[in-house]
Image (tube, helix red, strand yellow):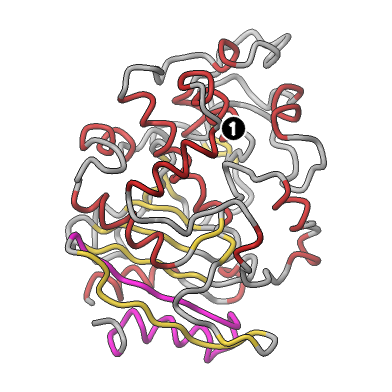
Amino acid sequence: MVETGPAADWARKQVDHNRVPVAVLGVASSHGIEDIVAFGSDGGRQATTDDHFALFSVTKPISALTVMRQVELGKLALAASLSDALPGFGVGRTDTVTLEQLLSHRSGISDPALDDGTPLREALTSAGQAFYSGSLVQYCNIAFEGAAAMAEWADGRPFEDQLLALAADTGAHGLTFNTECNPHTVHGTDAAGLDVQAMYKNRHPGAGLFGTATDLLNLGTELLRNSGKAVRPATLAAMRRPRTREVSHITTRPQPLRHTGLGFQMPANESDLFAQGIYGHPGWSGTEWWMFPEQDRCVVFLTNVLDTPDRGVDTNELFNAVAVS
């Protein structure tokens, strides 16, 4: 149980030290959810274990899993070109942007702001070129709109329908792009210059999902089981394979450096960690979703403040707490 364990103590500390107003922590294994605990209150709203939070970039691996279902069905290839699915994209570019590059932040697409009022597909089509595809690594949100476009091209169904099918298959029934789920208010948006409501309207496949701890724990349980309900074992292995180790990174936040597979991130420096082979993803809103295959653990940490590392929230502390929980 995590109620009195190191991981729960770590989550409670983030609230007690006023780093975040609320925190929900959950731990699961391949056998299912072990425990979920909630701490703190925000504006008179007490945090509960069933609350929805804005997941921000935790959306990315979920979208990647959705897209990779089309690859394992033979409807799409990692080497497929985005311009084939979206003929208006890349006019004037001399390179080819592939699905594999889109999912590993190597597309070279100039990333518009998350709250840009331009419809995502239009913004993607008109996006500029930051570098030759494959030559560098630069975090890119709009690339996941490209991956979504390719999944739609391959399958014929709207991407959101495909993602919700993944959610239903894995017990993540609360995942949604709809703000009617009453998510916690995200703090720090004014300081960051982010119009979060405009971002929500985009239903962004790289940053727009809302979810509960139960949703992410149930999906994580299926990944730990390698059950095939999300994707097949060989597909998951390919997604966990780092694709950015030998490529230079362009980043405004060098620490902690993480390598990227297909949608998933992995710690680049494991020397400070008890566990190896960790994979998952953080979100700008302070959310965390990580799998620990060696320890048979999935951890979810949900909160509602942008740039939590700048407030003293140390994810490596959480990783080590989970490894011994």
Q: Is residue 132 above or below residue 301?
A: above
Q: Is residue 319 above or below residue 16?
A: above
Give the side of residue 52 with respect to residue 325, left or right. right
Circle 1 residue: 143
Residue type beneath disc 1: Ala
Give how far across and how far down residue 96 sits, in percent: 56, 12
* Element under disc 1: helix
Task: State which region is magenta.
Answer: 4-30
Give the side of residue 245 with respect to residue 305, left or right. left
Give how far across and how far down residue 252 sits, in percent: 64, 50
Q: Quadrant of residue 100?
A: top left
Kindly identify the residue that appears in the image at 39 percent across and 25 percent down.
Answer: 70
Whether the magenta-drawn stretch holds residue 23 is answered as: yes
Q: Quadrant of residue 295?
A: bottom left
Kindly identify the residue that appears in the image at 59 percent across and 54 percent down.
Answer: 253
The quadrant in which the N terminus is found is bottom left
Kindly identify the residue that appears in the image at 50 percent across and 45 percent down.
Answer: 60
The quadrant in which the C terminus is found is bottom left
Give how far across and how far down residue 275 sits, in percent: 24, 62
Give how far across and how far down residue 236 sits, in percent: 28, 38
Kindly identify the residue that appears in the image at 32 percent across and 59 percent down.
Answer: 218
Residues packed near mark 1 inside 10 Å, few (<14), some (14 to 19) or many (20 plus): many
Whether the magenta-drawn stretch holds residue 221 is answered as: no
